[in-house]
Structures are given as structure tokens and as C-alpha cells.
Amino acid sequence: MPSILSFSHYVPERVLTNNDLARSLDIDPDWILQASGIEARRIAGEAENIVDLAVQAAQPCLSRHKPGLLLAASGSSTRRFPGPAAEIAHRLGLGPIPAIDLPHASTGSLIAMSLAAKLTEAHGPVLVVAAEKMSAPAQTDKSTAILFGDGAGACLIAPESASDSRGLEIVDFALHSDGAHTEALHLDLTGPLRMSGMAVIRHATRRLPEAIMEVLARNNTRAQGVAAYIMHQANQNLIDRVARAIDAPAERFYSNVRRYGNTSSASMLIAASEWHEQMHLTRGDTVCFAAFGAGFHWGALLARVRT
């Protein structure tokens, strides 16, 4: 089975707190925390672009293996084309390997990991990177300004022949899409981010548990038996709702949304990177990744500590 060998991440230095936002938006900072579970988010500088964030995040993943393919997810790229993937590969010194853009907000890293699990036998190790600069287009509306931050995450997925005992074997995944709700969450090339918060949370609250239970059922795994859940960090309330819906212990859902806010497609990998640095798992433990986002697209991926 292909395995995730490493995770890494990068977040900008500037911290935007709820108190900062409260002054500029004329709202109560306590309301922001109650509504979202977010206290602060990181904000990229004007000169920092998607490629800069991605390169910083990806470099630590390249210490042991050179990838034969790069998959780059971003929902906030500034151009119609080219996307950032080829420039990221060039800046990382990866040579003329294929570099593919996945313009998916929120679910981009999960989709990329799932594709990498299938493509790694043909291309060798696959570098997955997700980078977002969502704070600027979100600032025009109070409901989105409180949620979004900037950052990037990465992981390296290798075929079974290159895997080692430290890897997380990718056991199974499920991906789904429903284009009937494209207007509920979208970002045009010009203008602000548009989001119907109630529609997004309503669908996410239903679809995420469905996808998680789909991969668990196919692999005869109980929700209570999963050692850790790493979700897209949309907001804390959604994470808590999913935990209740599948009747799994809330403490097994890793969360850093309080410190970074919603970094869209980068959020799951940023969370995975921090979780991986402090995890205490044993052989055979299972980990479930899950995400929901614009499109709508959603899914889940099940991994296992190598036995």
C-alpha cells in the first residue's frame, strides 16, 4: 500500500487576533470565538504569494525522497493560468517532473492525497502541497472576515516499495461532488469571497459524517476505534458536530482552528503536520482524514500506522 511518509507546514508570522478584527469590523471579539472557535489567524504579507507559501511548507518533506510528481491545491490562485504548481516545482528544484494544479478550496489537499495514492506507482513519491491566501478576499464581509487565514501544508506519499515503518499506509478513500450548490461558496477572479454560511454548514454537517462512515464501514472499522481524526479546519463548531454525528470521542479530533482560523485547502495538512509532530500511535492504529468545501466537494481518507 502507498504510505504518507511525512508532513510539513508553514504559516506567516503576522497574527490577526479577534481583538484586532473587532476594532476594524465593530463587532464583539467574544462573539467571534463563540461563533467560530477561532481566536487568531495568520496573515500573509502583500509580497507573499501562493508559491512562496507552498515552497516554505514543502521543503521539509524533501529531505529523504525526491518526488516524481507534484500535486498543488489552491482555491486562491491569482491567475487564470498558469496555476502555481509548475512554479512551485521549479522553486523547489525538482526538475521537469509533472506538476498538476488542483483548484479546489477546502477539499484540495484531501483530493490530492487520494489521487497521489493511485498515481504513486506510476510516478514514484508524490509531493502534495496546498497553499492559500484567503484572508484578503474574505475581509469585505464580517461573516467571512472572522474565519479565514493564510498558510500552506504539505505531505509526501510514496509507493509501497519506498515506504518504511514510520509511514501511514493509505487504506481507502471516498470522494464525492455535488454541483447543485456552486453559488453557496465561491471566489471569482475579481471581487470578494461569497459564502452562504448556513447552506455550507448544513451540507457539511451531513456529508462529512456520511463520507467518514463510508470508508469506515468498507474497512470494518468502528468510529470509536479510530485513533485520530484530522479534518479540514473550517470552524470548531463543525468539527464538534461531526464528532457527535459519528459518536466518536471529541478529543480524538485534532484541532488548531483556534490559532490559525480556516486556511481552506491548506488547513487539513497544517493540522496533520502539527498532529504528526506530537502523535503517540502504535502499530495498526487508524487515522481518518476528512474535508468538505466549495463545489460542493467532500470526502474522507483512512490511513493506518504500518504493522
Image (cartoon, grey):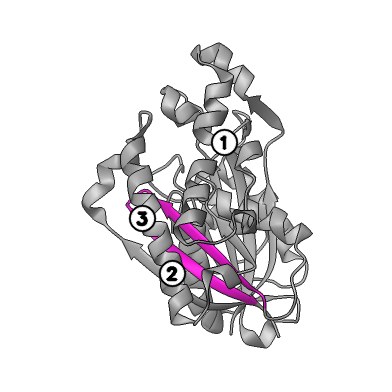
Disc marking residue 206: 3
Name the secondary structure under disc 1: loop
The residue that appears at 53% across and 57% down in the rendered structure is 86
Depicted 191 relative to depicted 226: above or below: above
The residue under the point 75% across, 75% down is 282
Residue depicted at 41% across the width and 72% down the height: 214
Residue sitting nearer the eye, 49 or 146: 146
Q: Secondary structure at mark 3?
A: helix
Q: In the rendered view, would you say 185 is above or below 172? A: above
Please tell me which residue lies in front, 147 or 98: 147
Q: Specify the amino acid type for callout 3.
A: Arg
User: In the displayed image of the protein, which residue is found farthest to the left?
Assistant: 180
Classed neighbour count for the residue bearing mark 3: other residues with Cα under 10 Å, few (<14), some (14–19), many (≥20): few
Q: Is residue 169 left or right of residue 36?
A: right
Part of the protein shown in magenta: 285-304
Residue 243 spot, x, y in % from top left? 52, 56
Quarter placement of the N terminus: bottom right
27 part of magenta stretch: no
Residue that label 2 marks: 213
Q: Position of residue 264 (x, y in %)?
A: 50, 45
Q: Is residue 289 magenta?
A: yes
For the residue marked with disc 1, what is the amino acid? Gly
Q: Residue 71: give x, y in percent of width and height.
A: 52, 63
Q: Which residue is identified by label 1?
A: 37
Q: Quadrant of the C terminus?
A: bottom right
The CA span between labels 3 and 1 is: 20 Å
SS of the residue at dot 2? helix
Horizontally, is 43 left or right of 105 in the view?
right
Among the two numbered marks 2 and 1 on one chain, the one whose residue lies closer to the N terminus? 1
Q: Main secondary structure of the magenta part?
A: strand
Locate residue 300, reporting x and y percent.
47, 65
